[in-house]
Image (cartoon, grey):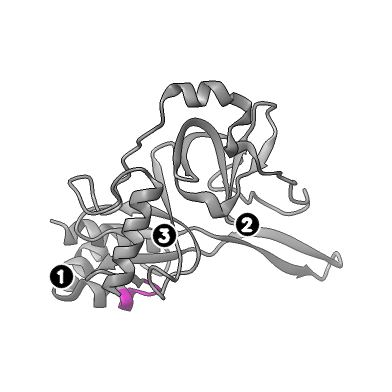
Amino acid sequence: MRIKLSAFFLTLLITSGSSFAQSKSGLFALDSTYLPAAYYENLKTDLPIYNGRLFESYPPTVIGTPFLDDAKWHNGAVCFDSIWYKNLSLRYDANDGSLLIEDKQLMPVIMPRQKLSAFYLEHRKFVKLDPSVDKTLTDGFYEVLNETKLPVLILRKKYIRETIDQQQSKIDREFVWISKFYIYKDKRFQPVQSQKDLYTILGMRRSVVAKALRKAHIKFKTNAEDAILTAAQLYNQ
């Protein structure tokens, strides 16, 4: 496993033009190194980040949005084919697992996923991980929520849930979250699917965390993200 992780960090050292290893900025620190401004100015609309296929909207009958939080464009940056690009208008399709960019004609374009290694949406950081890094992981873009001694990552996914409305003889379809949480500890990405998983990872600190969660009225079953982040913050103290 140590060999796999070393290869993973070495790959991202190359693709991001910088270090993805442990530093003062955290385990998943991304040094946003860019090419000379002339490269971006000369290519402009011909930049390779715009060479994707057009995004086709989901049927309007599906309730909710497939995107992360909302359907608005957000300022961001991407590491695409070993080069960083910034000041882009981006949206993340959590149902399809793809990143959209608004091109110069204001059209939504799906960026080729195989060439993306990391991106930012505002101040939120996402990194691409897959089973070659750790067999517990599935292929996707993981948001890095906590970068201290106990890093927390989440694979934010949505799926379309279908329910039968027998009274009106129709099928209702709705975007629903189905996210996966991980904690990076002992050089492994450990899945956190239950409160028991969380306490097992925390080890000797579990009693302190359990007391704090009860005091704050945070329950893993109803608010897993807050429970995990609170636990990580206490562990790091």
Residue topped by disc 3? 154
The nearer-to-camera label among 1 and 2 is 2
Q: In this view, does 110 lie above or below 134?
A: above
The nearer-to-camera label among 3 and 1 is 3
> Image point 33% across, 50% down: which residue?
13
> Image point 16% across, 57% down: which residue?
236
Q: Distance between the residues labelled 1 and 2?
A: 37 Å
The quarter of the picture where the N terminus appears is bottom left
The quarter of the picture where the C terminus appears is bottom left
The label number, if any, that marks residue 96 in the structure image: 2
Q: Where is residue 161 in the image (x, y as percent from the top left)?
A: 67, 65
Q: How far apart are marks 3 and 1 (CA)?
A: 22 Å
Q: What element carries label 3?
A: strand
**Left or right relative to 185: residue 164:** right
- In the rendered structure, which segment of residues is drawn in magenta? 192-197
Q: Is residue 125 above or below residue 193?
A: above
